[in-house]
Image: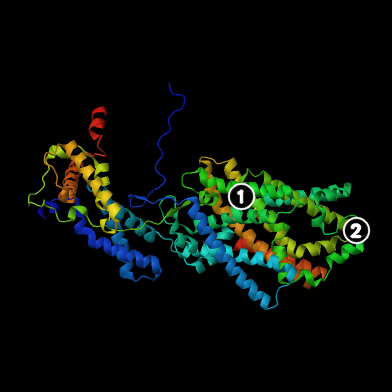
Amino acid sequence: MRLFRRRKPRPSPDIILTPEGVPLKLKVAGIGVRVAAQLTDILLTMAGAAAILILLAMLDLTEPHTLFAIGAMLFFLTRVPYYIATELIWNGQTLGKRLMKIKVVSHDGRTLSTHAIVLRNLMKEAEIFLPGTLVLALDAASPVLSLIAFAWVIMAFLIPLMNPYRQRLGDLLAGTHVIHLPQPVLLKDLAQVKVPVETEGTRIIFLSHQLDHYGAFELQTLESLLRADTGRMSPTAYDSHRKTLGTIIEKIRRKIGYADRVDPADHAAFLQAFYTAQRAHLEQRQLFGDRRANKHHAESDTTA
Amino acid sequence: MEQTVTLRSARFRAEREADWRLLESLVTQAERRGLQRMDYAAARDLAASYRRATTSLAIAREISLDRALLDYLEALTARAYLCVYAPQERLGGLVRRFFAASAPQALRRSWMFILIGFLCMGLGGLTGYLLYLENPSWYFVFLPPEMAGGRSPDATTSYLRSVIYSNDPDTTGLGAFATFLFSHNTRIAIFVFGLGVFVCLPAIALTFYNGLGLGAMLALHVDRGLGWDMGGWLSIHGVTELSAICIACGGGIQLGSAILFPGDRTRREALQLAGRDAVKLALVAAVMLVAAAILEGFFRQMVQDMSARYAIGWGIGLFWLAWALLAGRRRT
């Protein structure tokens, strides 16, 4: 008997379902990078407020004892429109977020609405800035109020840690979260690289039963190994890379029962040929509905 | 070479690669210059190319085991998705629409919550007034000394009069405006709104407490025969400022009631739904508080005549009321 019911596996927070019905992977941005973006924005708006304040002081519109109040007001008046305007113009990115390559997206995969942007940025005032100023302006006269404000700020910082989407209170209300912008880089197709031949000129051929041992995971691990940039390696790193290749080839040979020994000069060619053949085989199996996630696919087939 | 051509996923990629490269350049263009400034053909191509890319991605996930291809397509489609589904709103139109339609409509929709806000304040005022008449020492309970600014039952009548009709240059101009904007009442309004989420009680209590202080202060001045003068001093900005607090309270109560009575929805959904109007109420309250700070910082000292103070204060109050009731009605 199990005391606790096992929780249903929750869908990964990184997946967003587009209106086209194709789920996309957009990695949720962590607290650190968001705080960094926030600090950049605060510095920018403070600089803007300071510039206006200096202008006002030069025009003789301020007095020393009201300087602080006017400064606070200017900071507030530059801050609030700044966040809303930048996120509207740059599609959910303030300057700080652009710098950190993160972005606000709508939780349900639809267009980021104006209401959501306004709401999440106004809540930022209520969540962090106003209680924050209260904490900073701590006075001994009202310790209770300061303590409440402090607790509130702590809570505002804890909420994002509690949920998988790292949403703060404003995000929860507006139905948004923040993601890392993905960088599309197209590497060349390994299977498209000229099929290598052994130094003696014979082609390396694998039989169908030899390709039944591995699954997609092993294939893609091999892929990342083959994509390693040997040109940039230091001599020692290159040596160990060669040695790794040798070990892997031995393992593969033993596992699939490939009889011929592979000459060290042919290591790269052998792996290349094996990758292509294995990929062709697995993709074909997949087309027939036989997805092989990894080398344990045969065992899971029998238990299922 | 012939062996590679038989690889279905490689052929799939070779056939579509040019289209993906085109989409990549369009996406960079859209991100750099904005969708609005792209020419028609490019924008059309972006949308069409994006939909083709989503199809490609869906197919590639089925037929290809090439990690590099999958990662690239995934990232490219995501970037294009973010461009295609970008908010398309102009800032100018946004502000206009808020004041001309959505704000007054939200005010009318949530009239009951705002009424509750006014009731809280009014009842607080009445209670404070009556309690003061019963025993003046209540005054110190409701109004902490730093807020009353020397105006207490111990002060002389002439001092009270001098505060009402003071013409101190220190309390006028930009500095005073800034000070008043971040004064006690603004903080109350923010707390009243924000704390509404905690099942209404803090919002109601704070508004009521604010009313208590107000009532006691008014009672003190009525007691000294300065009732009408005090009314004028308070009216010029208070009509706007106190209404702002009541509206903020209405917004807070709306949020709290969504948590208390979510109806058929989940609490989070109800909160999100109530948030749509509550945020507009908060914005209206913020605008009114700024207006009140302007009145307090510039006009209260400039206008020394009692009836003029009444006229300005209530005139502006009437303007707010007319705006809330009449603006943004759809013609039938």
Q: Do labels 2 and 1 share a chain?
A: no
Chain under numbered label 2: B
Which residue is pictured at 35% across the width and 68% down the height?
B29
Farthest-out residue, bottom: A59
Residue at disc 2, secondary structure: loop
Q: Is residue B268 above or below residue A52?
A: above
Residue sitting at 23 percent across and 42 percent down?
Answer: A247
**Which residue is the site of mark 2?**
B155
* Residue B275 located left or right of residue A201: right
Number of callouts in the render? 2
Visible residue check, residue B105: yes
> Which numbered tag is attached to residue A153?
1
Residue type at tag 1? Val
Quadrant of residue A49 within the rendered picture = bottom right
Asked if residue A187 lies left or right of residue B169, the reply is left
Q: Which amino acid does label 2 sit on?
A: Ala
Quadrant housing the C terminus of chain A: top left
Picture colour scheme: rainbow
Q: How far, Cα to Cα, is label 2 from label 1?
A: 40 Å
Q: In this view, does A160 lie to the left or right of A220?
A: right
**Residue B33 location, x and y as percent?**
40, 69
Task: Name above or below for residue B129 compared with residue B307.
Answer: above
How far across and down, in percent of the image, does residue A66 sit? 73, 68
Residue B122 visible here? no
Assign the N terminus of chain A to one quadrant of the image: top left
Depth check: give the residue in front, B133 or A45: A45
Label 1 resides on the chain identified as A
Disc nearest the viewer among 2 and 1: 1
Residue B117 horizontal/vertical position (percent): 68, 51
Which of the 4 image quadrants contains residue B261? Answer: top right
